[in-house]
Image (cartoon, grey):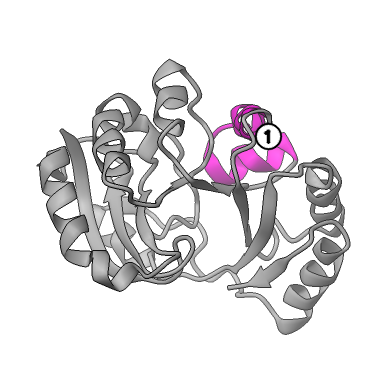
Amino acid sequence: MIRVHSVESLGTYDGPGIRLVYFLQGCNFKCLYCANADTIELKGGKATSAEEVLKMAENQRPFFGKKGGITFSGGEPLVQAKALVPVLRTLKAQGFHICLDTNGSVLNDDVKEALEFVDIVLLDIKHMHPEWHRKIAGQGNERTLEMAAYLQEIKMPVWLRYVLVPGYSNQTEAIHDLGKHFAAYENIEKLEIQPYHELGAHKYEHMGWTYQLKGNPVNTLEQLDEAYEILSGYFKEVVVN
């Protein structure tokens, strides 16, 4: 059984095509700008079986078309990797396209088994510099980079995601370093620049937490254009979401 925070039907921002998106409970990062802060604690959510997930997936299948399928997001879905494996195995046996949205911070035998049933990974890169990564996520980026290298090794298709936060992750040097690090990764199909927003701030207040980036400016068009121009020099496809 996996612990599910929420489910979104007809998702269009969480992998190829139209997708059924499962947001799982629990995350080992605590990012300053997290839009789903209520998924961070592992407790909570609804215990959900592989059979329940398959039933909903079958109901949604007519909308998926040739590219769509099921995405597991969070939180950090690989915190629940052991419980997720039988769910993924059940879905893959029925021919569903499976996408995993992860921060890459967990890599163990359960994760490696889970990846055997995954078609594409959305890998969230918070920052290329470890000290800034700790400021943003509370931990360094070593495990995320280890995961990226493993995904390259197994030739897993990857979409990189990078949240551009003014004052935190929009440094020109850091953006170049991101491009330089991953430019030779042949499994990376594209990079998505995600503009910073405060849409999850109200959840912090509801939970009694302090939103650390309150009042932080959103991106200017110039900042987004600069990041796009830099990263387009390293990746075959760059998009601004």
Q: Is residue 110 above or below residue 57?
A: above
Q: In the rendered image, which quarter contains the N terminus?
A: top left
Residue 96 placement (x, y as % from top left): 33, 51
Task: Name, please, the residue furthest toward the bottom.
Answer: 221
Residue drawn at 80 percent across, 55 percent down:
175
Q: Is residue 25 visible?
A: no
Q: Nearer the viewer, residue 190 or 65?
A: 65
Residue drawn at 81 percent across, 41 percent down:
181
Q: Nearer the viewer, residue 76 or 81?
A: 81
Residue 56 placement (x, y as % from top left): 15, 57
Main SS of the magenta segment?
helix
What crowding class fits label 1: few (fewer than 14 Cα within 10 Å), some (14-19), or many (20 or more)? some
Residue drawn at 24 percent across, 53 percent down:
207
Circle 1 residue: 152
Q: Secondary structure at mark 1?
A: helix
Q: Nearer the viewer, residue 152 or 229?
A: 152
Magenta stretch? 129-152
Q: Magenta segment: does it hold 149?
A: yes
Q: Is residue 107 left or right of residue 227?
A: left
Residue 118 placement (x, y as % from top left): 44, 40
Q: Is residue 235 visible?
A: yes
Task: Name, please, the residue furthest toward the top.
Answer: 109
Kind of residue at disc 1: Gln
Q: Magenta segment: does it hold 141?
A: yes
Residue 88 placement (x, y as % from top left): 31, 38
What count of labels does the image hold?
1
